[in-house]
Image (cartoon, rainbow, N blue to C red):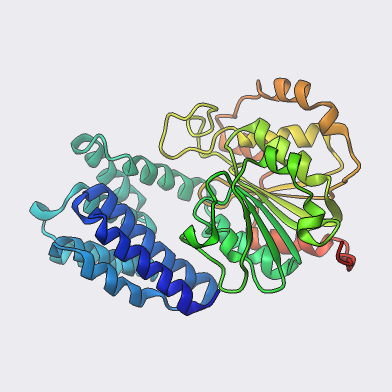
């Protein structure tokens, strides 16, 4: 996939949005502008490519000057200029013209500048004035994440670092969503994505510039029941895998068991959503927009039932990223204890204290990138496999 092809695909999405009159729906228009700007920011950060010229198409789509100002502020945000973006909103959108979405964006920009108290204050005002603006809840949660985690990296940065260090020849991702983490794959990696909604690579918002993944529009359980993973990979084992599917403990555990069968001593599994910022977002049933479910329960489960594994959770925004090494494909401990273990650990409460939470979830105390580098250095050198 080349730069020009992805540019054309993004411009096509913008034109389709224009044809569907998304601009006439403030909520959809705001979300769409944010998605396009976020995509441009992603390629700038991880691929060192400039996709920001496509914002001109996005601006042309907007009928109102206020929406063009918001789009430009978003562009500056994803160019890592939150202070300038804030100034743009303040200077060109006086209070009487600021919609709830514009003020929500201002709150996010304040948060990204480290002005969390000001961001929280603005969010609380918005909750009073716009009780149905769910995005505000996410901004408040992210203020807490920034404060508690004290980490400047999100989990995409950590996965990107792992790809750079490991240079995996094979990669399996469970839970593709918009394709953002899958788009971190580089030349030399055979990538497989599993997600019921992942119909085609062309439909994804994010795509690797070097790798076209093989996608399976199915649940992970159905995938492992019907597909031969080594045959698809052309290797008997995978190098790197990422679990980010259904946000439940039992599904994450099932995915881990299914993946470990095809692991080598040098394989690595990352698991998302293993460090919730509070008990509300860590609940099994979703009641909040910002939500990670009870995937975190897999950590105490693995610690107790599989002490042979090396498990480290990194405090990466927005909800932690666990790294598991020392995998053993012939171990049957988890499969034998699947039902009883699930029932027992389902009763495990999330500690109120962040310190206790870090202890329960094996949270790394230092810089996550350094931690991942150290973990990767301890891995045995991968064997070169012949295609199967």
- Front residue (pair 268, 59): 59
- Give the position of the C terminus as an image quadrant: bottom right
- Give the position of the N terminus as an image quadrant: bottom right
| Above or below, comparing residue 49 to residue 185 in the picture | below
Give the residue at x 66% y 42%. Answer: 220
Q: In this view, does 160 lie to the left or right of 100?
A: right
Q: Is residue 185 left or right of residue 22?
A: right
| Above or below, comparing residue 137 to residue 187 in the picture | above
Residue 82 visible within the image: no
Give the residue at x 71% y 36%. Answer: 253
Q: Position of residue 236 (x, y in %)?
A: 86, 57
Q: In this view, does 38 lie to the left or right of 261?
A: left
- Front residue (pair 202, 296): 202
Residue 163 visible within the image: yes
Q: In this view, does 313 lie to the left or right of 148?
A: right
| Above or below, comparing residue 350 to residue 103 in the picture | above
Q: Where is residue 228 in the image (x, y as percent from the top left)?
A: 79, 49
Q: Position of residue 317 (x, y in %)?
A: 52, 51
Rendered image quadrant of residue 35: bottom left
Q: What residue occupies the far left of the structure in this picture? A: 96
Q: How many labels does the image show?
A: 0
Q: Position of residue 63 (x, y in %)?
A: 15, 63
| Above or below, comparing residue 193 to residue 212 in the picture | above
């Amino acid at each position: 996939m080349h730069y020009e092809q992805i540019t054309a695909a993004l411009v096509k999405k913008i034109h389709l949005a224009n044809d569907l009159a998304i601009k006439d729906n403030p909520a959809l228009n705001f979300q769409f502008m944010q998605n396009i700007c976020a995509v441009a920011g992603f390629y700038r950060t991880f691929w060192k490519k400039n996709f920001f010229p496509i914002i001109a198409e996005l601006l042309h789509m907007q009928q109102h000057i206020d929406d063009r100002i918001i789009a430009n502020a978003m562009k500056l945000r994803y160019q890592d200029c939150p202070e300038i973006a804030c100034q743009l909103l303040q200077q060109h959108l006086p209070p009487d013209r600021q919609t709830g979405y514009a003020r929500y964006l201002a709150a996010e920009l304040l948060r990204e500048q480290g002005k969390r108290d000001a961001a929280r204050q603005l969010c609380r005002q918005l909750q009073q004035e716009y009780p149905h603006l769910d995005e505000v809840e996410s901004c408040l949660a992210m203020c807490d994440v920034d404060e508690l985690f004290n980490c400047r990296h999100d989990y995409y940065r950590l996965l990107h670092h792992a790809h750079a260090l490991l240079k995996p020849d094979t990669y399996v991702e469970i839970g593709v969503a918009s394709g953002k983490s899958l788009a971190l794959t580089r030349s030399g990696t055979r990538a497989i994505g599993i997600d019921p909604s992942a119909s085609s690579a062309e439909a994804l918002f994010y795509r690797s510039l070097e790798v076209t993944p093989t996608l399976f529009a199915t649940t992970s359980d159905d995938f492992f029941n019907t597909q031969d993973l080594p045959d698809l990979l052309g290797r008997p084992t995978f190098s790197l895998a990422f679990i980010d599917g259904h946000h439940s403990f039992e599904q994450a555990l099932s995915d881990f068991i299914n993946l470990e069968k095809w692991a080598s001593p040098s394989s690595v599994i990352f698991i998302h959503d293993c460090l919730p910022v509070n008990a509300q977002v860590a609940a099994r049933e979703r009641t909040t927009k910002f939500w990670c479910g009870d995937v975190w329960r897999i950590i105490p489960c693995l610690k107790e039932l599989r002490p042979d594994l090396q498990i480290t959770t990194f405090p990466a925004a927005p909800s932690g990223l666990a790294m598991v090494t020392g995998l053993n494909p012939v171990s049957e401990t988890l499969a034998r204890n699947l039902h009883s273990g699930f029932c027992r650990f389902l009763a495990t409460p999330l500690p109120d204290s962040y310190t206790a939470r870090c202890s329960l979830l094996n949270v790394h105390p230092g810089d996550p990138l350094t931690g991942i580098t150290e973990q990767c250095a301890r891995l045995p050198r991968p064997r070169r496999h012949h295609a199967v």
